[in-house]
Image (cartoon, rainbow, N blue to C red):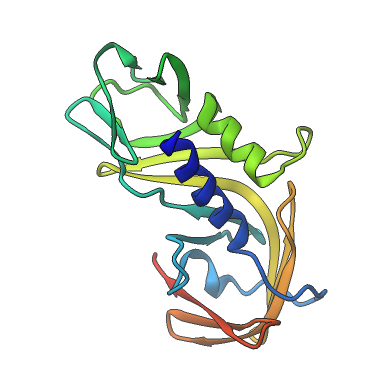
Amino acid sequence: MRITAMILAAATALCCVSCGKSSSSSSEVDTNIVGMWSISGEGADGGYIFEDNGTASVYFKPDNTYFEDDAFFIYGTHVGGDRLKFDGDILTAEVLNENFLTLDRVGEPDKTTFNGDYVITGGTMLETIIQSLGFPESEKPELHFRVEDNKATIVAVDAMDYTFDGKTLDLKGKHGFPSSSGETERSGDKLTIKRNDGKSRVLNKVK
């Protein structure tokens, strides 16, 4: 199924955003990197969301996935009519007579818009992501589906702990995410992280 293949590729990108050289660090969190950072030039539309409590989430934006005119589009597949149910709180999408996606809105119900933050609670899309990343059932992360202005973002919440002392960015993975670390140089809204393959990973501040 084409959608499943696309999700597998995107989910793999979700996990691989944290590739790098593993190490340990006792440095304090630098709250100057708090916010959303995107990975530049690696073919994956995703990155990190650093929180001010020393935790980080990992996100990716699936291609051609959005809501428009009371319908859901996932990698070019249209889900509408009675295959899409939404009461302002719970949203379910059906593809090929199967439950493809179940979302539970965070916060108060709102029937007037799809925009909002949802927890992915079921469906083959959730199963595909969990299986492709190899998360242990007892440790799988909470996955959110965020819709903003018809754009979708999938977020693995609290995927790792981090420290940054101005010289090294150290990421300690949780829920099956790998740990990584690298010498890091900050220049304004750009972080350049040295990788163990001799190349560099560049993160750009989004917001």
Measuring 74% from the left and 49% from the top, which residue is drawn there? 176
Image location (x, y in percent) of residue 64: 31, 46
Lateral position of residue 127 relative to residue 92, left or right: right
Residue 140 at x, y = what percent? 70, 38
Q: In which quarter of the image is the N terminus?
A: top left
| Residue with the most extreme top position | 82
Give the quarter of the image for residue 142. top right
Q: Nearer the viewer, residue 90 or 128?
A: 128
Q: In this view, does 128 lie above or below 123?
A: below
Q: Residue 72: x, y in percent? A: 29, 30
Residue 113 in sight from this viewpoint: no
- 12 left or right of 109? right
- As rendered, which of 60 and 1 lies closer to the eye? 1
Between residue 81 and residue 174, name the one nearer to us: 81
- When the figure is inspected, residue 38 is found, relative to residue 121, above or below; the finding is below
Find residue 180 and report its horizontal and vertical position in percent: 72, 69
Quadrant location, the C terminus: bottom left
Taking the spot 51% from the left edge, 53% from the top edge, the residue there is 59
Residue at horizontal 23 percent and vertical 24 percent from the top: 112
The answer to whether 42 appears left or right of 30 in the picture is left
Q: How many labels does the image show?
A: 0
Q: Residue furthest left?
A: 69
Determine the image quadrant of residue 148.
top left
Q: Dividing the picture into quarters, in which one does residue 107 lie?
A: top left
Tell me: 130 left or right of 75.
right
| Res. 106 in view | yes
Which residue is found at the position 56% from the left and 39% from the top?
A: 143
